[in-house]
Amino acid sequence: MSVTLQDVARLAGVSTKTVSNVVHDFPRVRDETRRRVQWAIEELGYRPNLSARGLRSGRTGVIELSVPELRQNYFAELADEVIRAAERRGLGVLVEQTGGDRQREIDVVTRRRPYLTDGLLYAPERLGTGDKDLLAGTFPTVLLGERIFGGPTDHVTMHNTSAAKAAVGHLLEVGRRRIAVIGAHPDGQVQMRAADLRVAGYREALEEAGLIVDPDLVRVAAPWFQWNGAEAARELLLAGVPFDGLFCLNDGLALGALRELAAAGVRVPDDVAVIGFDNIDESRFSVPSLTTVDAGRAEIARVAVDLLVERIDEQEDRQPARLVKPPFRIVRRESTGFDDKDVPESDGAA
């Protein structure tokens, strides 16, 4: 049988009201009493009933994170960072994955599948700026990612274009001039997607360096998994288009490309220098280790949780929606000719 509030009160020698005050972290409890109640909670393994607590207080102490797919390393590691940030605020996290399905994303943001949570961190993949009215409800929400700009909610995203431009700039700095890119979106239309924004940064870097953007060096790959990166690299090699640099729009694509380049006898970085994007944990352990863009994932999670807590606590005088973009940095490693132990990482926020 589950441990009850009454069981804790009995063991601690206090009233159930006092136990409730300690559980809800009310300040007017003597330190000695608080310690005794906390000891009893740990001794009995008591866990508050969030459903009942929510009905009484209007709060559950749980927030929701909605992402397209946890199978994508970036979102898995983002979820981990969000959970850590939420724990520091005393909150639990319910994680929902939509599979990039438009209707499921609509269901999440319109609360058609209600969960007992206090707020939503929301990273849609199929919605766009034209859907921003869906965010107009009163439920506390913070938007993540690139799909909807100018909406009514706080928005935490990354410097996609300028970070991609810096990534290509790094390849230019190490002497590469025929730079390919893997990860362009297959429909070829310019929209507010990470792929479009990063390809735009790629083009800007080349144009500012006085180089022609060769369409044969722009390769489609979607979704951004390792096997698609490997396939795109294979097609690039089979096409016989010369290239000495490769920018992959995420690290998963880059890891797949590294595998295919090695299988073809292409030496990295001697023949082709490679850079990725996201700085996922695996990027440190590839052979060679992967130079990449750290777009500020940990800071994105921390800021997003902090903003959401502010919105949850907000009673009146709601302030205007805020757009936050944490700084990025280039993490130089072996795939562009650097020893990760010796070369400092460079920061950027443009």
Image (cartoon, rainbow, N blue to C red):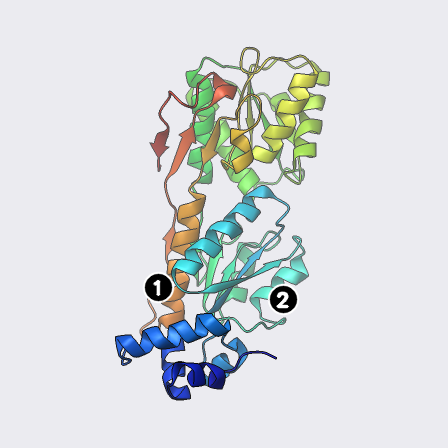
Tell me which residue sits at (49%, 26%) in the image: 291
The residue type indicated by label 2 comes to Asp
Question: What is the crowding at mark 2: few (fewer than 14 residues within 10 Å), some, or many (at least 20)?
Answer: few
Q: Give the x, y percent position of residue 301.
A: 44, 52
Residue at which label 2 appears: 107
Tell me the residue at 43%/25% (across/down): 332
Above or below — where is 298 with respect to 48?
above
Residue 342 placement (x, y as % from top left): 38, 20
Q: Closest to the observer: 253 or 35?
A: 35
Quarter of the image for residue 115 reads bottom right
Q: Is residue 252 left or right of residue 44?
A: right
Q: Looking at the picture, how far across and down is residue 101, in whole percent?
A: 67, 56
Number of the label disc, if any, that sits on residue 288: none
N-terminal label among 1 and 2:
2
Question: Looking at numbered disc 1 in the image, what kind of residue is underneath it?
Answer: Pro
The residue lying toward the viewer, choosing from 254 and 141, is 254
The answer to whether residue 257 is seen in the rendering is yes
CA distance for labels 1 and 2? 25 Å
Q: Nearer the viewer, mark 1 or mark 2?
A: 2
Residue 26 visible to the viewer: no
- Of helix, strand and loop, which one carries label 1? loop
Element assignment for label 2:
helix
Q: Is residue 108 above or below residue 20?
A: above
Residue at image position (54%, 66%) is 134
Q: Is residue 206 left or right of residue 101?
A: left
Q: Quadrant of the N terminus?
A: bottom right
Dividing the image into 4 quarters, which one contains the C terminus?
Answer: top left
The residue at 37%/28% (across/down) is 345
> Looking at the picture, how far across and down is residue 277, in whole percent?
51, 34
| Label 1 sits on residue | 320
